[in-house]
Amino acid sequence: MILSFSDLFKTINKEETHTVEIEMTSIKSRLGDFPIRKKEPVTLTLKNIENDKISIKGEVKLTLDIPCSRCLETVPTAIECSIDKELKIDNGSAVDEDMETTDYLIGFNLDVDKLVYAEILVNWPMKVLCKNDCKGICKVCGTNLNIRECDCQRTELDPRMAAIQDVFNKFKEV
Ligand SMILES: [Zn+2]
Ligand SMILES: [Zn+2]
């Protein structure tokens, strides 16, 4: 949905609150396409500050299906974040100086889906695990080791090598 600042901009210190449904059904990024399993409408409060700034505040709550970093099983992952922005008014349009991607703004129009998308990417979870002691998948045969053990010879490493392996795994899981 597109919200327009045009009216808001006519009255100093005017405040508006909008409750907006998120229209997108998944978050598509270079990491993949993650379905949105649950979403709540976003309540956005827009305020005209002294006629040269607009503040945008709101809360985003949604649940995405993200694969476990170790075993790749789908994990419903709740992401909650706050939107708290101040836009400058410059040459008849609103400008966000803090964000690189500002395609959610066109003149005095705000594309709520695109804003939520940008905020979700910024707040993306560092690591998603189905459970803390997820055993992952066998590197040899691909069996999900949470479900059953396989007979593969997964070489035991000496402790020094294990430390290196740990570092390696950390990189891989990001
Ligand atoms: Zn897992
Ligand atoms: Zn195996």
Image (tube, rainbow, N blue to C red):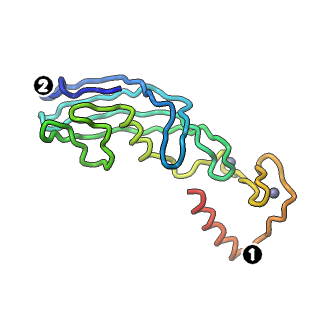
Please, is residue 55 above or below residue 100 in the view?
above
Kind of residue indicated by mark 1:
Asp
Taking the image as shown, residue 158 lies to the left or right of residue 30, namely right
Above or below, 153 against 53 in this view is below
Front in this rendered view, residue 94 or 28: 28
- From the viewer's side, name the closer residue of 103 and 44: 103
Q: Residue at x 52, y 52 (%)?
A: 126
* Horizontal relation, residue 32 to residue 54: left or right: right
Residue at image location 62% in from the left, 45% down from the top: 67
Q: Vertically, is 128 above or below 26?
A: below
Q: Would you say the beta carbon of the disc 2 residue lies within 8 angstroms of ligand 1?
A: no
Instruction: Name the side, left or right, on which 82 lies relative to 96.
Output: right
Q: Quadrant of residue 112?
A: top left
The quadrant in which the N terminus is found is top left
Q: Earlier in the sequence, mark 2 or mark 1?
A: 2
Residue 174 in the image: state x and y as whole percent.
55, 57
User: Given the image, on which type of amino acid does mark 2 rest?
Assistant: Thr
Q: Which mark is residue 11?
A: 2
Q: Is residue 124 left or right of residue 143?
A: left
Q: Position of residue 48 (x, y in %)?
A: 18, 31
Point out residue 5 in the picture as x, y percentages from the top left corner.
22, 28
Instruction: Provide residue 64's location: percent of width, then percent of height.
Output: 54, 37
| Residue identified by numbered label 1 | 158
Q: Secondary structure at mark 2?
A: loop
Q: Would you call the spot at circle 1 few (<14 residues within 10 Å), some (14-19), or many (20 or more)? A: few
- The residue at the point 69 percent across, 71 percent down is 162
